[in-house]
Image (cartoon, helix red, strand yellow):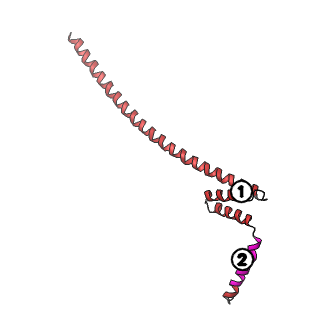
């Protein structure tokens, strides 16, 4: 198996890169950057990149798609933020409920103790009535 000479491979790569460079429009490159950021899960940066693309190329034929993607990602980020806030609120409420359950158990124990004391007092009162 023969390998092509390294110089030929490098030259081929260089010519391919040079040929593609002038053909790639800056607007589509900016949009591709935003798409790549989205694919990488870097949503905050992707929204900023879509915003930049839309600010610079509002009349581009791909602007509606960029706007739709931007809005979808921004909506996702907002929903994720709201979900985190709600989870924190839920944790706080669960802690509050746990505290109230402990308080309820304490009050029930106190109520039971008072009921027992009341029964003792009734028995004492009945004994005193019998003595009279």
* Residue for point 43% across, 39% down: 98
* Mark closest to the chain's N terminus, 2 or 1: 2
Q: Residue 80 carries which label?
A: none
Q: Quadrant of residue 51?
A: bottom right
Query: Viewed as shown, does residue 13 lie left or right of 77?
Result: right
Which of the image's four quarters has the N terminus?
bottom right
Q: How crowded is mark 2: few (under 14 residues within 10 Å), some or many (20 or more)?
A: few
Judged from the image, the secondary structure of the residue bearing numbered disc 1 is helix
Pointer 1 residue: 55
Q: What stretch is highlighted in magenta?
A: 10-23
Query: Viewed as shown, does residue 123 lie left or right of 45?
Result: left
Residue at the far top: name it.
Answer: 132
Query: Viewed as shown, does residue 47 lie left or right of 59?
Result: left
Above-or-below relation of 104 to 39: above
Viewer-side residue, 97 vs 10: 10
Pointer 2 residue: 17
Check if residue 105 falls in the magenta segment. Answer: no
Percent x, y of residue 116: 30, 25
């Amino acid at each position: 198996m023969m390998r092509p000479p390294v110089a030929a491979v490098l030259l081929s790569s260089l010519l391919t890169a040079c040929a593609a460079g002038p053909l790639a429009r800056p607007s589509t490159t900016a949009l591709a950057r935003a798409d790549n950021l989205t694919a990488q899960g870097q949503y905050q940066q992707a929204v900023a990149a879509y915003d930049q693309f839309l600010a610079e190329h509002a009349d581009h034929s791909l602007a509606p798609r960029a706007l739709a993607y931007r809005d979808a990602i921004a909506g996702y980020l907002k929903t994720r933020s709201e979900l985190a806030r709600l989870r924190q609120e839920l944790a706080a409420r669960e802690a509050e409920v746990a505290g109230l359950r402990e308080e309820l158990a304490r009050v029930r124990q106190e109520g039971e103790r008072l009921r027992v004391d009341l029964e003792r007092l009734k028995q004492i009162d009945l004994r005193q009535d019998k003595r009279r």
